[in-house]
Image (spheres, rainbow, N blue to C red):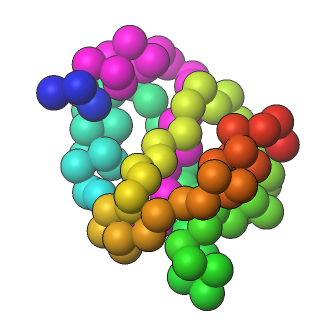
């Protein structure tokens, strides 16, 4: 229910949400019911399922309003380090 409410607040025509692959399918399903367009980026299994920053950077021209991150991760079970979380929340 929280996700649905957040998407409703953020959702408006012409804006995007970043969502990881692999992801918890409920996020993508809920996003598709909103006006948001889902832009996917990869998580890198060879790096402990960290965010692929090159993939995120390639999407920077889009009208991104938020990024979906689950920590600990689902479905991978990864846990982002504090260092990685700082990098995620820093400007690209």
The part of the image, by quadrant, that contains residue 10 is top left
Q: Is residue 41 above or below residue 31?
A: below
Q: Is residue 2 visible?
A: yes
| 82 lies left or right of 29 | right
Residue found 56% across the figure and 78% down from its top: 48
The quarter of the image holding the N terminus is top left
Vertical side of 85 occupied by 63: above or below: above
Closer-to-camera residue (4/11): 4
Q: Is residue 22 left or right of residue 42?
A: left
Asked if residue 10 lies left or right of residue 26, the reply is right
List x then y, in percent, for residue 8: 32, 17
Q: Which residue is at 60% across, 67% downward? A: 50
Q: Residue 21: within the magenta?
A: yes
What segment carries the magenta color?
4-22
Quarter residue 2 falls in:
top left
Q: Position of residue 27 (x, y in %)?
A: 31, 45
Residue 91 location in percent, x, y? 82, 36
Q: Residue furthest front?
A: 82
As drawn, 66 above or below 79: above
The residue lying toward the viewer, choosing from 86 and 59, is: 86
Tell me the residue at 34%/37% (across/down): 31
Q: Residue furthest left?
A: 1
């Amino acid at each position: 229910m929280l996700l649905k409410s957040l998407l409703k607040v953020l959702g408006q025509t012409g804006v995007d949400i970043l969502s990881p692959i692999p992801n918890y399918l409920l996020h993508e399903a809920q996003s598709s019911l909103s006006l948001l367009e889902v832009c996917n980026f990869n998580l890198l299994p060879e790096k402990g399922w960290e965010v692929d920053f090159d993939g995120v950077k390639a999407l920077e021209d889009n009208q991104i309003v938020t990024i979906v991150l689950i920590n600990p991760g689902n479905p991978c079970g990864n846990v982002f380090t504090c260092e990685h979380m700082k990098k995620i929340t820093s400007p690209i």
